Image: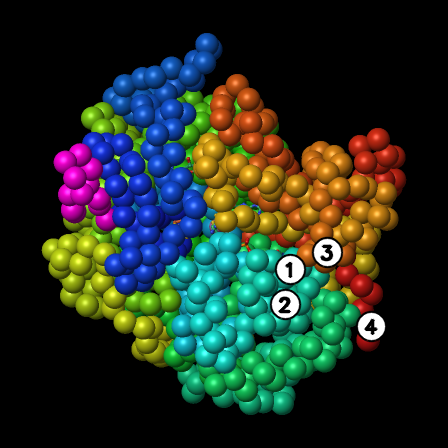
Amino acid sequence: MRAINDRSETRIAACNLCEAMCGLRITLAGDRITDIRGDEEDPFARGHICPKAIALRDVHDDPDRLRRPVRRTGSGWQETSWDEALHLVATGLAQTRARHGADAVAVYLGNPVVHSLGALTHVTPLMRMLGTRNRFSAGSVDQLPSQFVSYLLYGDQWLIPVPDIDRTSYFLVFGANPVVSNGSLMSAPGIAGRIRRLRERGGRMVLFDPRRTESAGLADEHHFIRPGTDVVLIMAMVRLILDEGPARPAGYVDGLREVRDHLEEYTPERAASITGVPANTIKRISHDFAAAPAAACYGRTGVSTQRFGALCQWGIQLLNLITGNFDRPGGTLVPSPAVDLIGSGRLDPGHYARWRSRVRGLPEFAGELPVAVLAEEIRTPGEGQVHALLTVAGNPVLSSPGGNALDQALPELDFMACVDFYINETTRHADVILPPTHLLQRDHYDLVFTMLAVRNIARYVPAPLPRPDDARHDWEIFRDLARHYRRKVRSGSLQDRSLMRLSPARIVDLALRTGPYRLSLAKLRRHPHGLDLGPLRSTMPARLQTPGKRVDAASPLLIADLARARADLLTAVPEDGLLLIGRRHLRDNNSWMHNSARLTKGRPRHELLMHPSDMAARGLTDGERVRVESRTGEVTVEVRGTDDIMPGVVSLPHGYGHARDRVALSLAATVPGVSANDLTDPEYLDDLTGTAALNGVVVTVRRPSAEPPRGPRRPHARAAVAPPVM
Ligand SMILES: Nc1nc2c(c(=O)[nH]1)N[C@H]1C(S)=C(S)[C@@H](COP(=O)(O)OP(=O)(O)OC[C@H]3O[C@@H](n4cnc5c(=O)[nH]c(N)nc54)[C@H](O)[C@@H]3O)O[C@H]1N2
Ligand SMILES: Nc1nc2c(c(=O)[nH]1)N[C@H]1C(S)=C(S)[C@@H](COP(=O)(O)OP(=O)(O)OC[C@H]3O[C@@H](n4cnc5c(=O)[nH]c(N)nc54)[C@H](O)[C@@H]3O)O[C@H]1N2
Ligand code: SF4
Ligand SMILES: [Mo]
């Protein structure tokens, strides 16, 4: 803390909008933010920030941000006291439980939960208290396949290896755009600089993506790949390397012969015909990857939120394992965080299919069901039907597949409550909204992303801005809600109740003291910019949570799922139509922050991107409004031609489409665009994990005035692939 002049002072903060955890310097005049910039002394991000951090100021100032609880009445939203609001929520949830059982209350946790210390520490005990099997989160539209594969291979869903980008010599990437996303399951602030330095030291970056992205612009090689087909290429690489070498797996890896036996059909030629990547390219990249001194293969949402998410993530792990790059500096390593809960019994290592969703029978993973079933669980009558919903920091109407159907289902609930500081497309259906303090008003320690960062780091940031009177933090809301709830339902263990009485800072302090570096909050306070704990280190097999500390590369669930890939990709009849994929932009943050004029100004970025040849075939012109239809919905949106997208593929960003209710939402509703998830399909999934296949959805595009396409629409969208050439 340093006084600049009489009136203003600067404080150290951390941006926790995305996974990069950039350090900030915030200048304040009273409780007004006058400046936000990168903290040059942050040992991890070294001053790097992106435009979203500066827009935190707009979140702070935004008159639309809720400061006090509101309830929905016949004549609109009405502010109410915290006591009244918490009482209403506790009563709504308890009454539903009394009438229909604990499973009748569903919970959805959105993305910012993992970025909020207090939400993380306090929402889990609250959920245990609610005791419902209908738990959902953004994980099933995101990284669930990575967690699932880590659980099967390494014995814990959170043992997720991270590419050692600062030391690798070959960075092989599938379906990620880190230059825009700033790295995901790979916290790496200033990623563009890290990629440049990789190339300066003679390394290579090779990227597979159906769009020539911003990251492709920095890579040595970019290859178009047909959406949803990556598994065939990845497995062809595994097969080639196992056959031709050099394969040098660690001694603790079992089952590779069995894996190889199941990959007989995955020849480079077959992969070429299905993915669109030439066989020689596949062979060359396999060879280069295996021969590189240190190589890291990595894949993110493009290969998770698709039809074969788990198989892709398995294949990526196999590539690292068989080449000896798993757990090797310059390869992929599991970070060693200062708060290390793996193996402590305090973090769920994962479990699978202990129960299934009521209507469709989809499996739970680690206590959660896929959000793709939420709407049907609300709408299908019968024993176990969902009648109440609590959402925390989420917007599933815009972020989950078939969001339009969920939008229609939510009004059928008996009761809905949300913990969020905005009225969004989802929370507008709530009976009560409980708004927490925002990111700069609360203490922060990154529990999740220090487990996923490319260096071992620890940083504790006391709230840079004061908490206004009468405002509550996320954790206080959960604590107080639990208190109100317990007056009506005797639930919750003694342990959870005492945990909820602790502040998040206290919980972090305890965890740091018992952690591997024996730190404490007091020690971290002496390093306000953050403490660098060094590069990632080899920790295997000691850290494996599997029986006998061995990796079973041929996990039966994954081997069995190859049959689905065979039926769907290797032998499927191609289907006409374009394949829809998503898109992120540096100035967007999922579905929120569209209230910031600073972020939304400039060129429109909500358009449907399409290859000029596909536009010409339909007689479409740039900027024209087109109708996009899928099995589940349709939208009308402007089209823009670009040869940065693969022919046969179209791209639409998610998180747009605010205009569906101009009354409830004010500023953001003026942002043009439609929701990609009005087109995605709740029945089009990675069936093994229930992760939504948001990429590779079959759509048709035409002029609104043109004849609609004839013939029945298929019940399941399926990746259109070229006929396999044997
Ligand atoms: N600016 C910004 N940053 C963000 C976010 C944001 O909204 N805005 N969101 C944050 C969140 S929640 C997350 S999870 C991360 C996501 O981080 P990333 O996964 O790195 O981000 P995306 O831009 O979604 O990149 C996915 C890429 O996969 C490609 N793709 C689509 N389908 C396929 C396919 O079938 N195969 C292959 N090989 N590629 C495919 C897409 O074209 C896209 O370029 O970003 C985080 N960071
Ligand atoms: N088609 C398609 N759909 C996608 C994706 C895609 O690539 N394509 N990406 C998916 C991914 S990776 C993700 S993570 C999801 C995100 O989807 P969600 O997590 O469902 O939604 P967000 O847009 O992140 O909504 C965040 C909400 O949290 C609130 N919020 C922000 N900070 C806080 C806080 O500290 N506390 C509380 N209580 N609330 C807060 C904001 O006001 C906002 O309303 O979208 C998914 N949907
Ligand atoms: S990259 Fe941008 S949004 Fe992400 S943490 Fe850094 S400043 Fe925040
Ligand atoms: Mo995400």
Residue 84, position as x, y percentages in the image: 28, 19
Query: Dot 1 lies on which element?
Result: loop
Give how far apart the Cα atoms at labels 4 and 2 are.
24 Å
Side of 290 relative to 607 (left or right): left
Judge whether residue 83 can be spotted in this image: yes
Disc 2 crowd, CA 10 A, few/some/many (<14, 14-19, 20+): many
Q: Is residue 670 above or below residue 563?
A: above
Q: Residue at x 50, y 58 (%)?
A: 179
Q: Which mark is residue 725?
A: 4
Q: Which residues are magenta?
A: 1-12
Does mark 2's beta carbon lie closer than 8 Å to ligand 1?
no
Q: Residue at x 38, y 52 (%)?
A: 49
Residue where numbered disc 2 is placed: 222
Give how far apart the Cα atoms at labels 4 and 1 are.
26 Å
Give how far apart the Cα atoms at labels 2 and 3 are.
14 Å
Q: Amino acid at mark 2?
A: His
First-in-chain label (2 vs 3): 2
Q: Are marks 2 and 1 in contact (CB under 8 Å)?
A: yes
First-in-chain label (2 vs 1): 1
For this rendering, which residue is in front, 341 or 351?
341
For this rendering, which residue is in front, 639 or 679?
639
Q: Amino acid at mark 3?
A: Asp
Query: Dot 3 lies on which element?
Result: loop
Disc 1 crowd, CA 10 A, few/some/many (<14, 14-19, 20+): some
Q: Which mark is residue 643?
A: 3
Q: Amino acid at mark 4?
A: Val
Give how far apart the Cα atoms at labels 3 and 1 are.
8 Å
